[in-house]
Image (cartoon, rainbow, N blue to C red):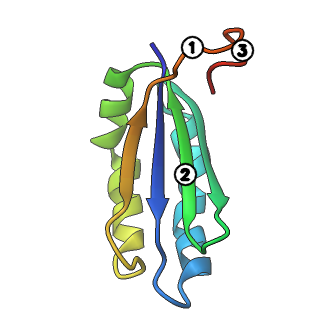
Amino acid sequence: MPVVVTATFTPKEGSFDHVVAALSPAIAEVHEEPGCILYAIHESPNGQILMIEKWESAELLDAHGAGEPVKRLNAALDGLLERPVEVMRHEPIPAGTPGQGAL
């Protein structure tokens, strides 16, 4: 069953562009990982950056979390964030058609 993840990044004041620069190389790299369906960043109105991920399975997501791209990303973010990244796993609640009820 697919797993959707959100990760919220809160840049320190003046560090928004640096956080985007740290996150950007991971987008293409992670899309090459087994099981990655979506790995995208979005700007929130409050100045945070929201990453939305979709993975084919929890197992493949766990492998991603232990992989080199995540280690490099964490190193690149060192000192740029106001607080730790808030990561949440989500499961769809069926509503409407299968295409309407899930990301």
Q: Quadrant of the N terminus?
A: top left
Q: Secondary structure at mark 1?
A: loop
Q: Nearer the viewer, residue 46 or 23?
A: 46
Give the residue pinned by disc 2. Answer: 51
Q: Which mark is residue 94?
A: 1
| Contact between labelled residues 2 and 3, with CB atoms less than 8 Å apart | no
Sequence-wise, the earlier of marks 3 and 2 is: 2
Sequence-wise, the earlier of marks 2 and 1 is: 2
List the single residue furthest toward the bottom.
14
Does residue 5 appear to the left or right of 98 in the view shown? Answer: left
Q: Quadrant of residue 74?
A: bottom left
Q: Residue at x 55, y 34 (%)?
A: 32
Q: Is the residue 70 above or below the residue 83 in the image? A: above
Q: Secondary structure at mark 3?
A: loop
Q: Is the residue 72 above or below the residue 89 in the image? A: below
Tell me the CA gap for discs 3 and 1.
Answer: 10 Å
